Amino acid sequence: MPRLFLEVDRIKKGVNAALLVDSVYSVIAGLVAYLGLPVLLKFFFESGTDMTQIMFYAKRYTVLCILFYIPLCVIFIFRNTMQGCGYGFLPMMGGVVELLARLLCAVIAMRVMSYSLAVFCDPAAWLAAGIFTMVSYFHVIKKIEKRKELGSTGTAAK
């Protein structure tokens, strides 16, 4: 059962700080991944492998994923915040949304035989789940504020 009196302002400050830190981290990690791709890719192939053909596909995959690192961070921040507040159902449903978005994108990619769309399966899942968990987070925060308000006025909280 969710705790009755959570410090909402503290939760919001923590979420905002985490969003800022994760956004900066996402940009830095994206730059490292993109700029280091030619070197990092060599760890996965035998020496002497012609990397020119592979690089086209690797760059497309890397760029598409990098562009959606921030929605991926949003999932983790909002999901873990809700769980920390005692709300487990909505974060779990965020995982279901993530799975369904990935599945739908994969099915469409197979139908149209598109590599770019197949690569977009992860970002599509991150975007869908990020939006869902963000909306869920605001719903949970309002619910917590309402409980706190009912509790502070002497009315029995439900």
Image (spheres, rainbow, N blue to C red):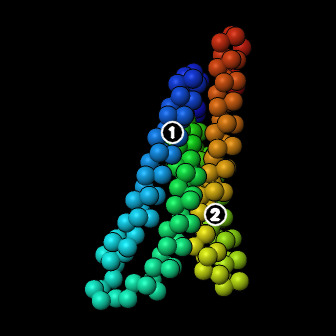
Side of 80 where 145 appears, left or right: right
- Expressed as whole percent of the image width and height from the top left, the position of residue 16 reads 54, 34
- Which of 84 and 15 lies nearest the eye of the viewer? 15
- Which of 33 and 122 lies nearest the eye of the viewer? 33
- Expressed as whole percent of the image width and height from the top left, the position of residue 96 reads 63, 58
Q: Which mark is residue 71?
A: none
Report how far apart the C-alphas of labels 2 and 1 lie in the structure: 22 Å
Asked if the residue under mark 1 is in contact with the one under mark 2, i.e. CB atoms within 8 Å, the reply is: no
Q: Quadrant of residue 115?
A: bottom right
**Residue highlighted by disc 2:** 124
Residue at horizontal 34%, vertical 88%? 49
Q: Quadrant of the C terminus?
A: top right
- Expressed as whole percent of the image width and height from the top left, the position of residue 60 reads 54, 73
Residue 1 visible, this orientation: yes
- Expressed as whole percent of the image width and height from the top left, the position of residue 31 reads 44, 58
N-term-proximal mark, 2 vs 1: 1
Residue at horizontal 67%, vertical 36%? 138
Q: Amino acid at mark 2?
A: Ala
Residue at horizontal 52%, vertical 24%? 10
Residue farthest to the left, as pictured: 47
Q: Quadrant of residue 4?
A: top right
Under circle 1, the secondary element is helix
Residue 92 visible, this orientation: no
Under circle 2, the secondary element is helix
* 155 is higher (above) or lower (below) than 64: above
**Residue highlighted by disc 1:** 20
Residue at horizontal 71%, vertical 83%? 112
Q: Amino acid at mark 1?
A: Leu
